[in-house]
Image (spheres, rainbow, N blue to C red):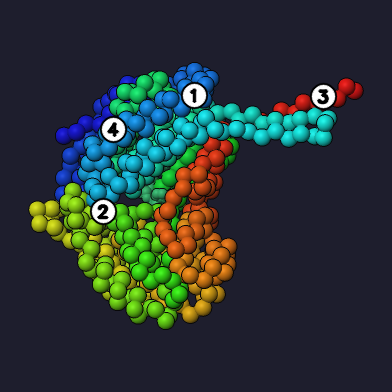
């Protein structure tokens, strides 16, 4: 049994209660790790350690901070295979995906923000020879970072790296469902020589540990990625305390396919945008709108290809769809498939649990394609976060736009067309934080990342993250003589 420990003030420690939660391997449904069931006292120790470490860390030169963060990035790369295997076992995702995407991106996050620390600058505003203003950008102090289970190390480091690069000290809480790589990151930080208290990682249940970040006066900002429900709870507590908040939440993203698209590229990418990581990426396109002239062709080809996707052992290289993250989530996905049937949907393929030989107790769901659902039904409006998509035809640009925007969410959207004017027009009017045209999940870490409506408040990525994790102060100097 692998035992995970908290990382507080530079040390790997047990939770003060001595209690641990069970950590599951989704591929076989077995308990394989012990996760600290931390309490308020553990969080308080972490916050105190971060507070004590702030002065020294925030006054280090940018170069010194850069060097430590680069060392962490290098060590993530050095441990690439070990981290990828840990991520796959903890989360159920195919090992090849963790190797190709999750772990390289975690290393990039540290490398990107290490260099950002060296480049970040603030503005000055001259007042026509009379005065000059300059802006100081100061770190906030102790900040809280809370992350979900779908891209565990990828999203955990996406928050921690910029927070540290700006000179803040951090208390971080990974998802209790997938804590393993955050624990391994703690070991890496120790090896990299990150000073004690600069980063503290507290494991445990959200309402017991994460919630403290919203209410504790010494936490100056909270960067959260997770569900809209929890984001709302955090905002309710933290907003009246005037904490800075960055909330990256759920999505129900439209994928709008016009008849004039590059069909082969669209089909290949749409399989990925529908089912990658078992559909458990906040950016997956789960509402697929297809222009009527190609609807039948698309339906035939897409369903045929979805049926061919091999569901099974995450450790096998030919597996396309691994296990979903937990029993609770597995049951939630299957219940949405039942709901889709009740709501009048036709299951074109999938719709069932899978029991791969030798892994019968794992949590696997077939890639599922549904048609015939009304735009307003729950299946088309609520985030399922599994390998389940619904397809619908449309007849005009106006209708496509109206359908795409018919959601309380607004995280990302994908548009497939070779018509440049149409692509720009729809991109401008679609209600989303990120729009991909003729691609999906093509990421440049310099760009603003986040959602609108119920998908989020604030932006991360590039300078947006550096601005979020700093407080601007204007200094005005009058240099006239009287
Ligand atoms: P979740 O909201 O249940 O949990 C996210 C994190 O918040 C976990 O670490 C959890 O322990 C913690 N938490 C729970 N209650 C809390 C509380 N009261 N106070 C503070 N922290 C608390 O989300 P999840 O199920 O882990 O992740 C799936 C969700 O994340 C989906 O909705 C998905 O769309 C979303 N997501 C969004 C993005 C994005 O960038 N917008 C990226 C990935 C995932």
Q: Position of residue 440 (x, y in %)?
A: 41, 58
Q: Earlier in the sequence, mark 3 or mark 1?
A: 1
Q: CA distance from mark 1 to mark 2?
A: 41 Å
Q: Earlier in the sequence, mark 4 or mark 3?
A: 4
The label on residue 324 is 2
Closer to the eye: label 4 or 3: 4
Q: CA distance from mark 4 to mark 3?
A: 54 Å
The label on residue 122 is none
Helix, strand or loop at mark 4: helix
- Which residue ends up furthest to the left in the rendered image? 358
Closer to the eye: label 1 or 2: 1
Count of marks placed on residues: 4
Q: CA distance from mark 4 to mark 1?
A: 22 Å
Q: Earlier in the sequence, mark 3 or mark 2?
A: 2
Q: Nearer the viewer, residue 275 or 54?
A: 275
Q: Earlier in the sequence, mark 4 or mark 1?
A: 1
Q: CB under 8 Å between callouts 4 and 1?
A: no
Name the residue at 42% across, 60% down.
Answer: 439
The label on residue 479 is 3
Circle 4 is placed at which residue position?
A: 78
Circle 1 is placed at which residue position?
A: 63
Local packing at callout 1 (Cα closer than 10 Å; few below 14, some 14-19, many 20+) is some
Task: From this view, report whether residue 334 is shown above or below residue 82.
Answer: below
Q: CA distance from mark 2 to mark 4?
A: 28 Å
Closer to the eye: label 2 or 4: 4
Closer to the eye: label 3 or 2: 3
Q: Earlier in the sequence, mark 2 or mark 4?
A: 4
Q: Position of residue 334 (x, y in %)?
A: 27, 62
Q: CA distance from mark 3 to mark 2?
A: 64 Å
Helix, strand or loop at mark 2: loop
Q: Nearer the viewer, residue 449 or 259?
A: 259
């Amino acid at each position: 049994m692998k035992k995970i420990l908290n990382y507080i003030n530079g040390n790997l420690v047990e939770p003060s209660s001595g209690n641990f939660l069970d950590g599951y391997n989704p591929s076989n449904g077995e308990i394989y790790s012990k996760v600290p069931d931390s309490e308020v006292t553990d969080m308080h120790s972490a916050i105190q350690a971060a507070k004590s470490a702030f002065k020294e860390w925030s006054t280090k030169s940018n170069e010194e901070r850069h060097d430590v963060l680069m060392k962490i990035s290098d060590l993530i790369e050095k441990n690439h295979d070990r981290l990828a295997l840990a991520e796959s076992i903890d989360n159920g995702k195919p090992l090849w995906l963790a190797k190709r995407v999750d772990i390289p991106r975690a290393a990039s996050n540290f490398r990107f923000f290490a260099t950002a620390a060296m480049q970040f600058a603030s503005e000055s505003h001259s007042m026509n020879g009379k005065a000059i203003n300059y802006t100081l950008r100061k770190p906030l102090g102790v900040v809280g970072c809370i992350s979900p289970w779908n891209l565990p190390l990828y999203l955990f480091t996406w928050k921690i790296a910029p927070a540290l690069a700006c000179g803040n000290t951090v208390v971080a809480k990974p998802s209790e469902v997938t804590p393993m790589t955050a624990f391994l990151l703690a070991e890496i930080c120790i090896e990299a020589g990150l000073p004690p208290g600069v980063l503290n990682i507290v494991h445990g249940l959200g309402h017991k540990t994460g919630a403290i970040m919203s209410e504790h006066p010494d936490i100056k900002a909270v960067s959260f990625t997770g569900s809209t429900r929890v984001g709302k709870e955090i905002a309710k507590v933290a907003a009246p305390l005037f904490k800075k908040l960055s909330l990256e939440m759920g999505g129900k993203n439209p994928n709008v396919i016009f008849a004039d698209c590059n069909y082969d590229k669209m089909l290949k990418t749409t399989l990925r945008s529908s089912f990658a990581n078992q559909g458990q990426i906040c950016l997956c396109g789960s509402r697929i709108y297809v222009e009527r002239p190609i609807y039948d062709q698309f339906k035939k080809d897409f369903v045929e290809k979805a049926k061919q996707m091999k569901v099974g052992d995450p450790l096998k290289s030919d597996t396309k769809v691994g296990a979903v993250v937990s029993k609770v989530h597995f049951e939630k996905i299957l219940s949405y498939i039942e709901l889709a049937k009740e709501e009048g949907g036709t299951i074109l393929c999938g719709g069932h649990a899978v029991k791969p030989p030798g892994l019968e107790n794992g949590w696997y769901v077939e890639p599922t394609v549904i048609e015939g659902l009304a735009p307003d039904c729950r299946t088309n409006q609520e985030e399922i976060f599994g390998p389940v998509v619904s397809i619908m035809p449309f007849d005009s640009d106006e209708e496509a736009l109206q359908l795409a925007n018919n959601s309380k969410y607004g995280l990302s959207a994908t548009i497939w067309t070779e018509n440049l004017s149409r692509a720009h027009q729809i991109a401008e009017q679609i209600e989303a934080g990120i729009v991909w045209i003729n691609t999906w999940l093509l990421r440049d870490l310099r760009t603003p990342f986040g959602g609108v409506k119920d998908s989020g408040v604030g932006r991360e990525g590039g300078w947006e993250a550096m601005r979020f994790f700093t407080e601007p102060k204007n200094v005005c100097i009058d240099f006239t003589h009287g």
